[in-house]
Image (cartoon, rainbow, N blue to C red):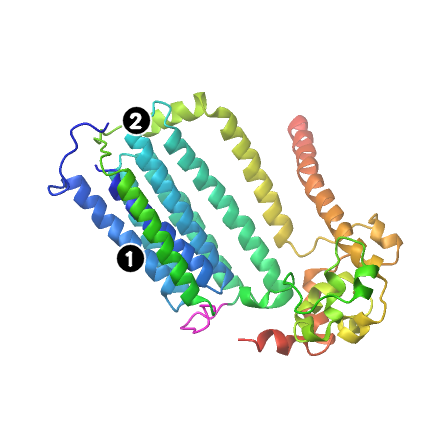
């Protein structure tokens, strides 16, 4: 077997995956294209493992590892996509522009107010982004759910306390970290107790 | 490895089979990224993965081929189909699956393909590997994994556990922020339950038409 054949097939598959990642709009199609790219890498690994005749089979073992990691990636990626769909009612990548650069320069008032690392959050008071601001409202209302009308740009502009914006994501991350670290330990404890009892 | 390279003009049966399977894989991958129907993309991905499993089989990597069939065709595709169904994607023909930068994406992909194919052909023109069956059997790979690659294997099991817990935490909707959250003390309510979000976006006025009216 000429090694050129699998290498060329893998190169073509990788290019097709690149096209899919760049050109597709649906997030699940982007995930499929990422899978295509991973499979191209797998084909290369297997072919070069056969070519080099590795006694440890590093290429094929690494292929198995890549397959497992791809499965984990798809699982977590789809969970993120579903959470996104619950919050935004869309999975189109073109509409998820929360982290885009604002069109205008931020006003000096914004710069002075937000010494926190979340400096981009108050930037939706810029009128050029008024069309984008409603897209932001679910996450905004997820942070400050006490006042539903706080998601309008007018309400955002007049000096809402910036420390709320900066403290809310940290609180979320703390909560996530604690919940993920509590999960396995509680499960383990339960299993150990059950195993000892029986 | 590189001595006595057979001619390209007289391909063996294995090479012919591999090239046919590779053509099937590349063609169905092209259909995955160009089809207008979302479910068809997932089904063409099944064909592509199956053809790649056949390629592995021709390359004497039997165990990898069966793992490919089991995990990719069996699990990943089902997961992707679940994702398609749960996001209530349009099952029929839809026109907005491609974003506006198709031309730029095609240019980038063609440039990538050109560079990669040129370099690969130039670099591995004389590489030849005789295929000896049995090198990728389950016994050989198992012995290799559990003797040499034990530590990455165990690390991978921990990664799978982390991915499992992460997916569960991300997709459950009834996990609330604890009352011991420091944000609670400063008057900020805990992060909202995602179940409540549709009703809240309904009350916050005007945001759902903007979200769905964009496409």
Quadrant, the N terminus of chain B? top left
Q: Which residue is mark 1?
A: B27
Compare residues B7 and B144 and report the one nearer the observer. B7
Q: Is residue A164 above or below residue A155?
A: above
Seen in the picture, residue A169 relative to A192 is either above or below; the reply is below
Asked if residue B52 shows in the view, the reply is no
Q: Residue at x 67, y 29 (%)?
A: A192
Q: Position of residue A75 (x, y in %)?
A: 53, 49
Asked where in the image residue B30 lies, by quadrant, the reply is bottom left
Residue found at x 43% / y 50%? A35
| Residue A174 visible in the current orientation | yes
Asked if the residue under mark 1 is in contact with the one under mark 2, i.e. CB atoms within 8 Å, the reply is no
Q: Are marks 2 and 1 on the same chain?
A: no
Q: Which residues are magenta?
A: B89-99
Left or right of residue A10, residue B210 in this image: right
Residue A53's disc number? 2
Q: Nearer the viewer, residue B107 or B43?
A: B107
Q: Chain of mark 1?
A: B
Q: Is B108 included in the stretch rendered in magenta?
A: no
Q: Nearer the viewer, residue A111 or B129?
A: A111
| Relative horizontal placement of residue B20, taking residue B179 as reference (left or right) | left
Measure the C-alpha gap from mark 2 to mark 1: 30 Å
> What main secondary structure does the magenta stretch of the protein show?
loop
Relative image position of residue B129 (x, y in whole percent) = 23, 32
View extreme (top): residue: B147
Q: Is residue B98 magenta?
A: yes
Q: Does dot 2 land on a helix, a strand or a loop? A: loop
Residue drawn at (54%, 52%) of the image: A77
Q: Report the residue at 41% width, 64% height from top.
A: B39
**Rendering coords of residue A24 (x, y %):** 45, 63
| SS of the residue under disc 1 | helix
């Amino acid at each position: 077997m000429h090694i050129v054949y699998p290498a060329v097939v893998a190169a073509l598959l990788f290019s097709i995956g690149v096209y899919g990642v760049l050109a597709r709009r649906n997030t699940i199609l982007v995930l499929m294209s990422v899978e295509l790219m991973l499979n191209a890498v797998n084909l290369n690994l297997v072919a070069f493992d056969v070519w080099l005749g590795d006694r440890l089979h590093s290429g094929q073992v690494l292929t198995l590892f890549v397959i497992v990691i791809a499965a984990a990636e798809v699982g977590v990626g789809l969970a993120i996509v579903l959470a996104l769909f619950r919050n935004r009612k869309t999975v189109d990548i073109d509409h998820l522009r929360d982290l885009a650069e604002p069109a205008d320069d931020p006003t000096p008032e914004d710069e002075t107010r937000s010494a926190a690392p979340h400096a981009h959050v108050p930037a939706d008071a810029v009128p050029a982004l008024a069309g984008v601001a409603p897209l932001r409202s679910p996450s905004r209302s997820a942070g400050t759910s006490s006042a539903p009308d706080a998601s309008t740009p007018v309400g955002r502009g007049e000096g809402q306390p910036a420390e709320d914006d900066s403290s809310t994501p940290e609180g979320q991350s703390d909560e996530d970290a604690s919940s993920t670290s509590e999960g396995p330990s509680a499960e383990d404890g339960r299993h150990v107790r059950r195993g000892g009892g029986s | 490895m590189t001595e006595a390279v057979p001619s390209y003009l007289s391909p063996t049966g294995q090479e012919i089979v591999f090239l046919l399977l590779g053509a099937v894989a590349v063609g169905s991958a092209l259909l995955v990224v160009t089809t207008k129907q979302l479910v068809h993309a997932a089904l063409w991905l099944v064909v592509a993965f199956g053809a790649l499993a056949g390629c592995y089989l021709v390359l004497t990597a039997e165990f990898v081929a069966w793992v490919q069939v089991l995990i990719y065709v069996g699990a990943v595709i089902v997961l992707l189909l679940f994702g398609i169904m749960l996001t209530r994607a349009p099952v029929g023909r839809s026109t907005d699956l491609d974003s506006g930068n198709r031309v730029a994406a095609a240019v980038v992909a063609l440039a990538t393909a050109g560079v990669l194919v040129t370099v690969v052909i130039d670099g591995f023109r004389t590489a030849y590997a005789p295929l000896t069956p049995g090198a990728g059997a389950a016994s050989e790979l198992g012995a290799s994994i559990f003797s040499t690659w034990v530590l990455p294997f165990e690390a991978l099991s921990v990664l799978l556990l982390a991915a499992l817990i992460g997916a569960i935490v991300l997709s459950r909707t009834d996990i609330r922020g604890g009352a011991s959250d420091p944000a609670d003390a400063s008057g900020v309510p805990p992060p909202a339950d995602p179940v409540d979000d549709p009703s809240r976006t309904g009350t916050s006025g005007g945001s759902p038409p903007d979200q769905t009216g964009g496409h």
